[in-house]
Amino acid sequence: MLYLNERTKLCKYVKKMYERKFTNSAGGNVSIKVDGGKYFLMTPTLMSQNYLCDLRPEQILVIDRQENIVEGEGGITREINMHMASYEENPNIGSIVHAHALNSMVFACLGLEMPNISEASEKLGRINCLEYQPATTPELAKIVRKEVKKDQTIPKAYLLRKHGVLVVGATLEKTYDMLERLEWNAYIAKEYLIFKQIGVPGMDDLNS
């Protein structure tokens, strides 16, 4: 089996995503660049809906740059266009995680920029919510491509309006790490905005 170790590791991280409510049965997908971009490893379509993110290494797809399946079970998710657009625009990206993280979805669904207020998520910079386009469409991939081209910083996280989050990073480990930090920051930011709205004393000193 090609890239057995990498595919096994990808299965482990995807299952952890589902267990920690970083994605749900509505979707999500993860990819890794291997061999300098000659191939990409990617989770199959319906990984959440059909398998609850509990995948076997054989189900992880090995895909070439033309999006042909070299090895693996199942079909290619239609959201591959969003992944490939990111890889093409920034060669430093080595892994991409698209998820429906519970707390981050609050900001994504409301179309709000997420306040980045935790020390652990500082390196993500501004966490913008992108203009809405339907999931899986070329139009959404085009918007993602534009954002990645404009800002080559990694790691980087984007909120996808009404849909979820997209995190790009150098490796699977670092990208997942940023997803976890993003989701913790989302919870903290949500509570912060509630506390601020109800006038909890000391809120003006938060950034001191």
Image: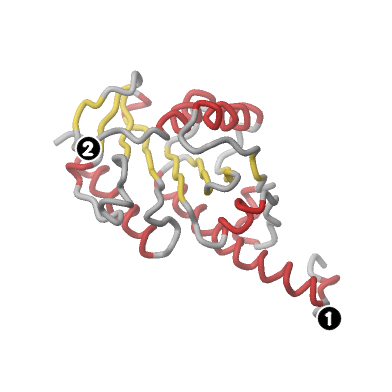
In the image, residue 123 above or below residue 102: above
Residue 80 position within the rendered picture, expressed as x and y whole percent measured from the top left: 40, 32
Query: Residue drawn at (37%, 37%), measured in percent from left and top?
Result: 32
Quadrant (top left, top right, bottom left, bottom right) of the N terminus: top left
Circle 2 SS class? loop
Q: Residue furthest left?
A: 1
Alpha carbons under labels 1 and 2: distance apart: 54 Å
- Foreground tag (1 vs 2): 2
Query: Residue drawn at (34%, 54%), measured in percent from left and top?
Result: 13
Quadrant (top left, top right, bottom left, bottom right) of the C terminus: bottom right
Residue 108 position within the rendered picture, expressed as x and y whole percent measured from the top left: 61, 51
* Numbered tag placed on residue 201 in the rendering: 1
| Label 2 crowd (10 A; few <14 / some 14-19 / many >=20) | some
Tell whether label 2 touches label 1 (CB within 8 Å).
Answer: no
Among numbered discs 1 and 2, the one appearing first in the sequence: 2
- Residue 158 shows in the view: no
Quadrant in the picture for residue 194: bottom right
Query: Residue drawn at (70%, 50%), measured in percent from left and top?
Result: 113
What residue type is disc 1 on?
Pro
Residue 60 position within the rendered picture, expressed as x and y whole percent measured from the top left: 25, 40
Q: Is residue 80 left or right of residue 196?
A: left
- Residue 185 shows in the view: yes
For mark 2, what is the residue?
74
Quadrant in the picture for residue 25: bottom left
What residue type is disc 2 on?
Gly
Residue 112 position within the rendered picture, expressed as x and y whole percent measured from the top left: 69, 51
| Label 1 crowd (10 A; few <14 / some 14-19 / many >=20) | few
Query: Residue drawn at (33%, 31%), measured in percent from left and top?
Result: 40
Circle 1 SS class? loop
